[in-house]
Amino acid sequence: MEISIHNKTEVFLSDLHLPCIHQEAYALAEKIIKDVNPHIIFLGGDIVDLASVSSWLHNPKEVSLRRELHNSRQWLYRLRDTFSRKTIYYLRGNHEDRIMHYIWKHAPELSDIDELSITKLLNLDQMKIQYLKQPIRIGKLWHFHGDETHLYNNAVNVALNVFRRLLNNVIMGHWHNCQAYYHRGVDRKTRGSWVNPCLCNSNDLAYDRFANW
């Protein structure tokens, strides 16, 4: 998918892992959005965590799908109310896919029930937030979540490795680190890849409290 735009600005946010959002980090991000006043707010995936339907072992007393969805909807409604005139795109991430994967594994008969899709569960259509299932190019910049690149989890320079794989301008999240790589080709054009830092609080993630983010 491609969107042709000219002379428009965008803010890219990713990996909030609601409800495990880092409040101070997001407060700064929100201030930047207000200062930049972009045309587009792009949610680059893993906005929700959905630990309750994760394949990882978890304590059901600590996580609740109903509560996770409720908190996520509340945050999205607040985002839409705060930036009511902005175009908002929401690209799927591997955590958004958890609902679908859980149904495929445990209740495949329910896989064609539209009301169980992430767009319906989060009320995205009602909020006029466009959900994207595939990477998209906006102007000259490709937007990925990051898991689509199939890099190993122990990759060190993600931005460099992503550029070598895609050979194009790309921004993504997923890796929870801030990286950038620039390349000037024989055509004397500079291209690059950018990895966006996360906006979640690792102390609240029961499965990875000692992460190096």
Image (tube, rainbow, N blue to C red):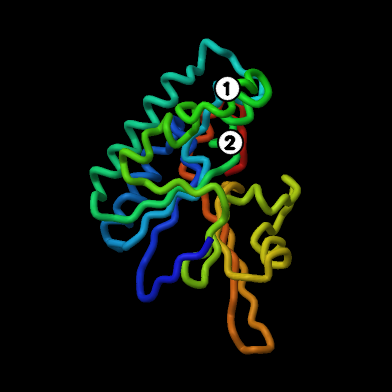
Q: Residue 187: horizontal and vertical position, in percent?
A: 64, 89
Q: Helix or strand or loop: what does disc 1 sit on?
A: helix
On the rendered image, what quadrant is the C terminus found in? top right
Examine the rendered structure and indicate whether residue 211 appears above or below residue 135: above
Q: Earlier in the sequence, mark 2 or mark 1?
A: 2
Residue at 26% over, 50% down: 83
Q: Is residue 164 left or right of residue 58?
A: right
Examine the rendered structure and indicate whether residue 164 appears above or below residue 124: below
The picture quadrant where one finds residue 73 is: top left
The dot on residue 134 is none
Q: Residue 98: horizontal and vertical position, in percent?
A: 59, 31
Q: Residue 169: horizontal and vertical position, in percent?
A: 58, 69
Q: Nearer the viewer, residue 211 or 136?
A: 136
The residue identified by callout 2 is 97
The local crowd at label 1, few if under 14, some if 14 to 19, many if 20 or more residues have their Cα within 10 Å, is: few
Residue at 57% over, 51% down: 134
Q: Nearer the viewer, residue 77 or 192?
A: 77
The residue identified by callout 1 is 110
Amino acid type of disc 2? Asp
The picture quadrant where one finds residue 122 is: top left
Amino acid type of disc 1? Leu
